[in-house]
Image: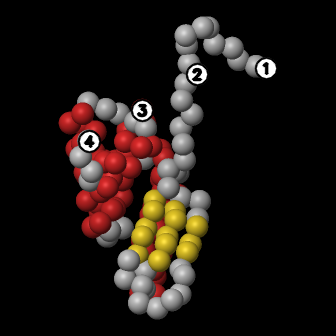
Amino acid sequence: MKTTHPAGHHRPRKRLRAVLVGLGLDDADATQRIINGDQCLILGGSEQTHAEMLETVLRLESELERRGQSLGEVSPADLADIAWRIDSPELHRVALRMHHELRRRGLSFHESSPELLTEISLGEDS
C-alpha cells in the first residue's frame, strides 16, 4: 500500500545505519588493511594498530549483541558506558563529546543528522 502525504508535509526521515569508522595512520609498510563489517569500517594502520582496532570493534559488537541493540540504537551516553566497559578510552571520549554537545545544543541523538553527528564526533566546531 502506498502512503501519501498532504502537500507541504514531508515523510519522516529514514534513520541511517550507524557505523564506527577506525582509521589507522601509522602504516609503515605498503600493506592495505581494510575490514568492513555490519557496524564497522577499519582502514589502514600498522598490523598492530589494525589488530587493536579490530579487537575493540569485536568487543563493541559483542556488548551490543548482549544488549540486543545495534550501534544506531545506542545513545551517546550508553555508548560511553559501553566504551568504558570494553576498555576503549578513545571511543569513550568521542561518545562523551557527542553526549555533552547534543545536550548543550538541546538536540536528540536520534533526531540529529548524520552530518551533525559526524561533525560532533570529530570535535569540529560549527
Q: Quick one: label 3 or label 4, which is nearer the N terminus? A: 3
Of the residues shown, which amino acid type is indicated by label 4? Ser
* Measured Cα–Cα span from mark 2 to mark 1: 15 Å
Residue 1 badge:
1
Query: Toward the viewer: 112 or 81?
Result: 112
Residue 75 percent coordinates (x, y): 38, 44
Q: For mark 3, what is the residue?
A: 111
Mark 3 or mark 1, earlier in chain: 1
Residue 11 is marked as 2
Dot 4 or dot 1: first in sequence order is 1
Residue name at image x 76 percent, y 19 percent: 2
Residue 19: % across, % down: 50, 55
Mark whose residue sits in front, 3 or 4: 4
Q: CA distance from mark 2 to mark 4?
A: 27 Å
Q: Are marks 3 and 2 in contact (CB under 8 Å)?
A: no
Tag in front: 4 or 1: 4
Quadrant for the N terminus in the image: top right
Residue of label 4: 126
Mark toward the viewer: 2 or 4: 4
From the top left corner, tell me how far across and down residue 111 is, in percent.
42, 32
